[in-house]
Amino acid sequence: MITVENLSKSFAGRNGPVVALDGVNLEVPAGTVLGVVGPTGAGKSTLARCVALLERPDSGAIRVDGTDLVSLDGTALRAARRQIGVVPQGDSLLRQRTAAGNVALPLESAGVPGPQRRNRVAELLDLVGLTDKAGSYPDQLSGGQRQRIAVARALAAGPSVLLADEPTSTLDPDTTGSVLTVLDRARAELGITVLVVTHDMAVVRRICDDVAVLENGRVVEHGRVLDLVSDGTSRTASSLLPAVDQNPLAESRFDRVADIVLVGFAAVGALLPEATSRFGVELNLLGGGLTRLAETPVARFRVGLTGERSDSALEWISDAGASVQRTLKGPQGVAA
Ligand SMILES: Nc1ncnc2c1ncn2[C@@H]1O[C@H](COP(=O)(O)OP(=O)(O)OP(=O)(O)O)[C@@H](O)[C@H]1O
């Protein structure tokens, strides 16, 4: 479990201090993945560097399993660092070492004896699916394979927390998938707590349980991904859900127009037709579609309803477990 309490950090800038983090509070439950997103300069990397103990915050606390890392120094700090594996931004492997040699590095530094080290490296290469690349040099690996080796190296010392700063930013969508699978396996098979900094909402969609949005050094939204997508006021929701094209002309033909979000719904296909027959309304799909958030199917549809009992139909859909967000009330276009 990682807890960040009131964390602040400024840097000296040409025109005075630059506030990178301004009273950040976050919690990452043990064995979950938190995605930290936000625009360029929001403070994401600074947060990751502070949690990795590569940067000292000006104030605040960073607790890993209850211990405040900020208050540590000397031997205690070195021991705490071993609890935190870091996948740095960009290409970070040593060119003159093989894949196995890169993974072995932290074990060599920790003085782990040869036979034990070899076993551990073999386990880690297996975890990231690159056993057959043990003897390859970084230049002989693809970008995605290099990142998977960087993840294996970050896991070598047996950390309880893994930090990954933009682990997929230089990769194409296919290769991104293989790196995300490895991060997901680290959480699922080793029970590691993962904090991943990213610009890419596909990373959040694929592996994150929770998401935190940083802007100007502050957390402006934080919560479970599956809760946020059902929250009509969430700014993260629209970038995670299937897009809906705006079509005011088509929408104006209906008595009611609503966005309906269904999370983990096995009967997505059945709910809307049932509302139609129960309430005698005409219900038309105007846009949206299906996606997956990690393993959970999620749908967002924009629907247009015509008929006297349109409101009752929407209420019934909501009672059945969907999030119903009214976007238009009546053909005159008065917002609800
Ligand atoms: N070492 C430093 N010295 C001076 N200013 C810094 C330093 N590191 C970060 N900053 C400033 O702190 C702010 C936050 O930077 P940070 O790199 O944490 O943002 P970010 O959200 O990770 O951005 P990006 O998405 O571009 O990586 C920015 O204004 C940045 O210029």
Image: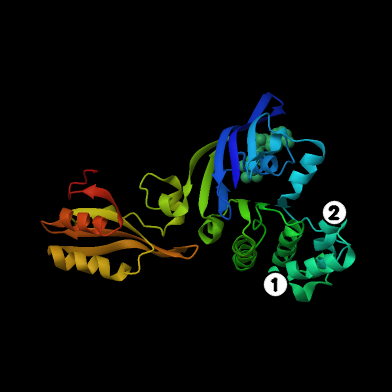
- Which numbered circle lies on residue 129? 1
Mark 2 vs mark 1: which is more N-terminal?
Answer: 2
Q: Residue at x 65, y 52 (%)?
A: 166
Q: Is residue 257 left or right of residue 227?
A: left
- x and y percentages locating residue 55 in the rendered image: 73, 37
Q: Is residue 274 left or right of residue 179?
A: left
- x and y percentages locating residue 73 in the rendered image: 78, 35
Residue 77 higher or lower than 153, as above or below = above
Q: Is residue 319 left or right of residue 231?
A: left
- Which numbered circle lies on residue 272? none
Residue ID for mark 2: 110
- x and y percentages locating residue 23 in the rendered image: 57, 31
Marks 2 and 1, how far apart in space?
24 Å
Kindly report which numbered mark, 2 or 1, lies closer to the viewer in this rendering: 2
Q: Residue furthest bottom?
A: 132
Q: Is disc 2 placed on a helix, strand or loop?
A: loop
Rendering quarter of residue 9: top right
Evaluate whether residue 249 shows in this view. Answer: no
The amino acid marked with disc number 1 is Gly
The amino acid marked with disc number 2 is Ala
